[in-house]
């Protein structure tokens, strides 16, 4: 006989409360394990396919680990130093960019932007603020991400955790399944399948889309000659999981930087005559890169890798990221998406049960 609904709600409420308390007090400590578990979850389908191809679980995990190590070494040697360098250069260049914007506005709208104008003063303050606060922002992100753990510990612990969790993933899921309450095992399994489907579509599929688009944007912008192409591509790819936001933010940032870099930047000397021209071709190429990226995402990548319906609305994602990030810091942002997916599945399940109940249909609907 199943427990009464009131007692079940009490026990589940206690479990949720314990989970939140653990996250609150141990957020920085459990960070490597959250990252390792996320990596193992994303790589488990690859290990399963290698097993179907004839490899053992140990061999499959060893192959994945070797490939991941090689990719990490390449990123660490080739990409990360350039990314850090461009980020610092972009922050240092911000006041100059705003000064050029101010000069352009002054030239075209002299009546609106004079020396005592509010617009001009605000532009100066924005440039100075970005330069002074940019380093603090990066340091704040790093400190919130790492907390008491340093980079070296993360680089050691996360791969080890991911390796062992990937190695024992099937055993862990079977063990958890054996501990489910027998009265609700079928319902919980169905909810778990729905959650896994949502997470697989979003995290694995959308994560692949972000990686492909970020690489495309970074390589395309760097080949187009944009000074900060790598960091712009990284930003655009990182937030591509929010529909339209990644392309909008990255596109505006890239085109804005292209205008500052190529607007009047080419000097042609003809005797004593020096003129500045605008390289519209380069600016058009930068805009075209993001236009083609949107076409690629909407018509090829997202339909193939993510699917038609993920069940995570962009507003719900932003809300979850904001709430969990403010409450639990960087760890909260990491678990925000899977928790949002779980809550979304549970909410849809509850809504279906509500529509089947007398509370919704009434006595007339049950006749």
Image (cartoon, rainbow, N blue to C red):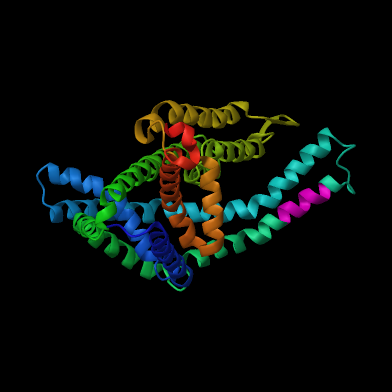
Q: Examine the rendered structure and indicate whether residue 164 appears above or below residue 206.
A: below
Asked if one can make out residue 312 in the rendered structure from this viewpoint, the answer is no
Q: Position of residue 148 (x, y in %)?
A: 46, 74
Q: Which quarter of the rendering shows the C terminus?
A: top left
Q: Position of residue 212 (x, y in %)?
A: 40, 38
Residue 104: give x, y in percent of width and height: 77, 38
On the question of residue 177 being in view, the answer is yes
In magenta stretch: residue 324: no
Q: Is residue 124 magenta?
A: yes
Considering only vertical position in the picture, is 131 above or below 354?
below
Hey, which quadrant is residue 160 in on the image?
bottom left
Q: Nearer the viewer, residue 220 or 49?
A: 49
Residue at position x 43%, y 53% in the image: 339
**What count of labels does the image hold?**
0
Residue at left offset 40%, top offset 43% = 349
Magenta stretch, main secondary structure, is helix
| Residue at image coords 33%, 52% | 74
Q: Quadrant of the N terminus?
A: bottom left
Q: Is residue 334 left or right of residue 323?
A: left
Which span is picked out in magenta? 120-128
Residue 253: % across, % down: 60, 41
Tell which of 123 and 59 is nearer to you.
Answer: 59
Compare residues 50 and 252 and report the one nearer the observer. 50
- As displayed, is residue 84 above or below residue 106? below
In screen coordinates, is 251 left or right of 106?
A: left
Q: Quadrant of residue 4?
A: bottom left
Q: Nearer the viewer, residue 198 or 79?
A: 198
């Amino acid at each position: 006989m199943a427990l009464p609904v009131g007692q079940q709600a009490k026990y589940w409420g206690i479990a949720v409360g314990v989970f939140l308390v653990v996250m609150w007090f141990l957020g920085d400590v459990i960070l490597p394990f959250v990252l390792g578990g996320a990596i193992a979850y994303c790589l488990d389908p690859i290990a399963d396919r290698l097993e179907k191809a004839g490899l053992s679980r140990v061999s499959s995990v060893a192959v994945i680990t070797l490939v991941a190590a090689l990719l990490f070494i390449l990123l660490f040697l080739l990409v990360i130093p350039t990314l850090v360098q461009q980020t610092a250069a972009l922050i240092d260049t911000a006041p100059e960019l705003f000064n050029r914007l101010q000069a352009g506005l002054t030239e075209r709208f002299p009546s609106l932007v004079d020396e005592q104008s509010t617009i001009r003063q605000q532009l100066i303050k924005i440039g100075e603020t970005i330069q002074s606060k940019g380093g603090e922002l990066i340091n704040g992100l790093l400190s919130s991400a790492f907390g008491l753990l340093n980079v070296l510990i993360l680089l050691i612990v996360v791969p080890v955790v991911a390796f062992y969790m990937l190695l024992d993933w099937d055993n862990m899921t079977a063990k958890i399944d054996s501990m489910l309450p027998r009265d609700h095992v079928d319902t919980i399994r169905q909810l778990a399948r729905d959650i896994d489907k949502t997470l697989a579509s979003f995290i694995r599929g959308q994560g692949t889309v972000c990686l492909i688009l970020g690489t495309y944007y970074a390589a395309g912008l760097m080949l187009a000659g944009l000074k900060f192409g790598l960091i712009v591509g990284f930003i655009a790819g990182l937030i591509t999981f929010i529909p339209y936001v990644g392309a909008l933010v990255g596109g505006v940032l890239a085109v804005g930087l292209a205008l500052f870099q190529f607007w009047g930047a080419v000097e042609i000397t003809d005797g004593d005559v020096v003129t500045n021209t605008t390289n519209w071709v380069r600016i058009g190429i930068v805009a075209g890169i993001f236009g083609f990226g949107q076409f690629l995402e909407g018509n090829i990548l997202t339909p193939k890798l993510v699917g038609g319906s993920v069940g995570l609305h962009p507003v719900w994602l932003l809300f979850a990221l904001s709430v969990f990030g403010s409450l639990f810091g960087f760890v909260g942002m990491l678990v925000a998406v899977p928790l949002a997916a779980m809550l979304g599945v549970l909410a849809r399940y509850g809504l279906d049960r509500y529509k089947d109940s007398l509370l919704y249909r009434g006595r007339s609907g049950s006749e």
